[in-house]
Amino acid sequence: MRTEELLINMGPVHPSTHGVLRFKLTMDGEIIRKCDIVMGYLHRGTEKLGEMKTYLQFVPYTDRLDYISAFPNNYAYVKAVEELAGVEVPLRAEYIRVLTLELNRIVNHLVMLGSLLLDLGGSTMIMWGFRERENALQLFEMLCGARMTFNYIRPGGVREDLPEGFIPKLNEFIKDMENRIVDYEELISGNEIFIMRMKNIGVISAKDAINYGMTGPSLRGHGVNYDIRKIEPYSVYPDLDFRACVRNECDSFARYMVRIDEMRESLHILRQVVDAMPEGKPTSQAKYGIAPMTGAPTAVSTYFPRIFTPPPGEVYSRIEAPKGELGFYVVSDGTIKPYRIKIRSPSFCNLTAIPKMVEGLMIPDLIAAFGTIDVVLGDVDR
Amino acid sequence: MNPAEEIKQLFPGSVVSTGLQTNKPLATIKKEDLLIIAEKVKEMGFDNLSLITGIDYRDRFEIIYNFFSYAKKQNLVLKVILDHDKPEVDSLESHWKVADWLERETYDLVGIKFRGHPNLKRILLPDGWVGHPLRKDYDMGVDQFVTLGEDGEDIVSTDGSNLLRR
Amino acid sequence: MAWISKNWTMIGIVKGLIVTMKHMLRIGNRPTVTVQYPYQKMKVWPRFRGLHAVDEKACIGCGICEVSCPNGTIRIVKYKTRWYPQVNVGMCLFCGLCVDACPMNAMKMTGNYELADYTRESLVYGPDRLLFNKEVEQ
Amino acid sequence: MLFLAMWTGDIMFANAYDLIVYILNFIGIYEPINNIFETLGIEYVLRIIIVFVEIAVLMVFALLTIMFLTWMERKVVAIVQARYGPMVTGPRGLLQPVMDGVKLIGKEDIIPAKADRWIFTLAPFIIFIPALLIFIPLPFGESLIISDLKVGLLYIIAISAVSPIAILLAGWASNNKYSLMGAMRAVAQDISYTIPLALSALAIVLFTGSLSTVDIVSAQSATWFGFIPKWFIFLQPLGFLLFLIASIAEMGRIPFDFQESEQELVAGFFTEYSGMKFAMFFLAEYAHLFSVSAIVVTLFLGGWSFPFLNLLPSGLVPLVSFGIFLVKTYAIIFFAMWLRDTVPRVRIDQLMNLGWKIMIPLALLNLLATGFLLTAGVF
């Protein structure tokens, strides 16, 4: 019998491509033979923009990369700039940063779980995920006045200290969240249909996964015990007790379970951070405008100047963002603007593995595997 | 042992200099020997190619590879300096699959060509885009309009005449 | 038969049904959380970064907000006798850098987030719509 | 007056036509009207008018049910998801379906340029009309049945087998790869799940010896020990489970909703439809939901029958039995919605495996066991 291969164009406007990604699928009936990924529909030239802005002005643009979890973006960029300039950060600021990072990790995984289940056809999880996410967003709004685009972490500290009533509300959130994760597990993890859909789907060996540049939770589902928080400790992570969540099955279900474990682990970290939060100034409430207009920072512990010139040099600094390894390569030429900013976005590199992963699977499996890779198109296209 | 020094010992002729990039060992190498050194780097256990950065320094291009080894928990930075007139370098796609897209991105935005890359097309920008935006001499004054063609391909024009309505 | 899990008793689905039923009956701290938006609004925290507001008495029209804006949103325009910022909300990032930069503490951001409008021109908020704490005209 | 008479009278009718005739007779206008038509020699006109009235009542009931179901679906889903659901139009958003209808009527009716115009237009009607036709042999209550067909069950299965044709037409005519794939999936699913559906219904027929839905219901109206109803769910638990799963697949509800599978195929076979044509598919889907649930109730949950129903004055029985029937049907519908909230969708090959490798063998086994036990006289 003569059969023809069917070319299916999935996206850029499609319910389950998490934005404007486009798959060009060569299908043999329901089986995917070849998967080409076309992207760039959300390309905003962030790297070029970075060359036009001062170091401080670029911070709001990093919010727009991975808009689900913007604190890690803020922090990765700020960490690169701080390493470049050799800035000391007060301890309280570091603790507040870790607090926001871990809170944001929970938010990110909630959205990921919700959209994964929505892609599989279960509409309940996304609403429950967004219910808890809303509580976290309330905390963010309380902290920095914005719900998704924070612009909170600044070179030399954070924008403002914790507001009054923040810690009790956070404790409430942690307590609430613990019960809710049990709900999620009861709804999803044991569900036979979910297991049928996820087990042995999107399998790629650990070696291949590394070779394809997968990082973060997606890689930890492949049995690679690797967490930048552990192997290249930054901020106050060395002082905190946590573990890298690893699963060995190499399939979509393992990648999903890593997310659930990480949420628990993040709650654990949050509890420690709340207990260990030191007194002191995170940064001052002082206004940036009265700072020296140029020159290296003098008293960073109190404020960070609006305009500042790090010494010429280049730095590659990376952190463990919720989606994987987020790195900023910042080159300074000694002026007030960075000479070059290169963003190593986790979504972009994790996405590389998809064509290999889905070969020989079906469209529903593509969606399941793609959901567990957890990409955000703002991060892919930059 | 510092992997950069190790590479220098193995390939004394091809390493221009070694040093540190903040705290990561850095080796600047000749562009002709990139493939051989990359093979060695892969053998040394650097299984993760973290980032490829192309930088336009007006007189030269620099391309920087950030490696990481999951086994040894070590970093390594390789730097290759290219001519500004003819920015071409060998592709590492055969060793690290992630280099496929990273190199396409570098080609797209900086305009460095990678020899031996199987599919060196633009990745973020539409196919007909004029210029490479992250070059310092990129003309930002020219507006470019992108529309969809009959078969879904991108059509780029500079006057906007292909837009349905202005 | 590898394609069906060994757990054919479907106990997981039954557990899931119980959880959804708990939600349906609102058992154990699982309340309705959404608000009926146009009729009922959520509380905005004091630090919320919404539409700008400029203290007329304090603002000296120095233009530091203009240069600190990453997006070129703010322009200093003449209003009555003095110079005040004018914000184009259509391209504002609501990052708050202008507020941080103000040396006179004159700029602040309010909790007003309902800024959708019919024309692009009406998104440009001139001093007449931004100023508060107005001087009494004599 | 009428109700009083029905309260005391001993009435039992074969179908709703007789009921209407009885009511007209009771009021005293049937004879005069009939006489007028008889003098003109066209006495069949009155019968046609009565049938039309029946159809009109059925249509209104079906459409109201569909509208209510769309509202109920949204409300149930919303409540599970910690939301309110529609709240603005009417009390608790009860008029939301009306607004939806108005919106859909007002929408532009787009026919894609390369679509097959005739088939594209025809498909929504072909799917909508059988969805209403299924209502004909459904016993809504005692003597509340449009027509007690001798082959009622066969009729239902045959009519519901028409919808794959319409789906295939719609998918093919849309000239869209997603539509075609959705249609192919839906047809494969419908065909493979009609078999266990019919097989497990056949086990019921072995009990009753009749395909008539009325006979099936009256066979279940007896009780054990006076209070346990003799519903077939107790005699045929496996059959009930198979029938329920297969009927959820027939409805195209979430664990098996391959007709749409919106996250994979955008909207399946009605990707290209808009406006009223889309509304037709939508209505047909909900009509299916109701009718299939009603069939489940009729076959396994005793239809309109309930213990102690015979203690009521017989005049009230049609009304009360109608209420009982609705409650049971809505319980099944609620279960389908509840299930929708809980589970994700299975994959198409898993669905096929489930249908062909598990459900059909089990249904056959069930049929065989039932036959043996019946022959042995166990029941």
Image: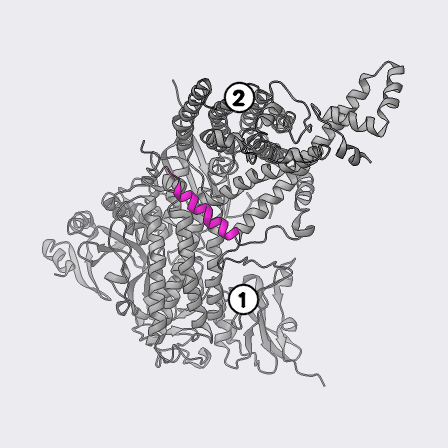
| Label 1 secondary element | loop
Q: Quadrant of the C terminus of chain A?
A: bottom left
Q: Residue furthest left?
A: B9
Q: Label 2, on which residue?
A: D205
Residue beneath the point at 42% across and 60% down: A177
Chain of the residue displaying label 2: D
Residue D308 vs residue A110: left or right? right
Task: Depth check: give the residue in front, A368 or B6.
Answer: A368
| Label 2 secondary element | helix
Say which amino acid is labelled 2: Val
User: Picture quarter containing residue C33?
Assistant: bottom right
Say which amino acid is labelled 1: Thr
D174 over A188 or under it: above or below: above
- Label 2 crowd (10 A; few <14 / some 14-19 / many >=20): some
Q: Label 1, on which residue?
A: C73
Cα gap from disc 1 to disc 2, whole angstroms: 76 Å
Pointer 1 and pointer 2 on the same chain: no
Magenta extent: C9-24
x%, y% of residue D202? 50, 22
Q: Which mark is residue D152?
A: none
Task: Depth check: give the residue in front, A224 or A283.
Answer: A224
Q: Residue furthest front?
A: D225
Residues at circles 1 and 2 in contact by the CB criterion of under 8 Å: no
Figure label count = 2
In the rendered image, is residue B86 in sight?
Answer: no
- Label 1 crowd (10 A; few <14 / some 14-19 / many >=20): many
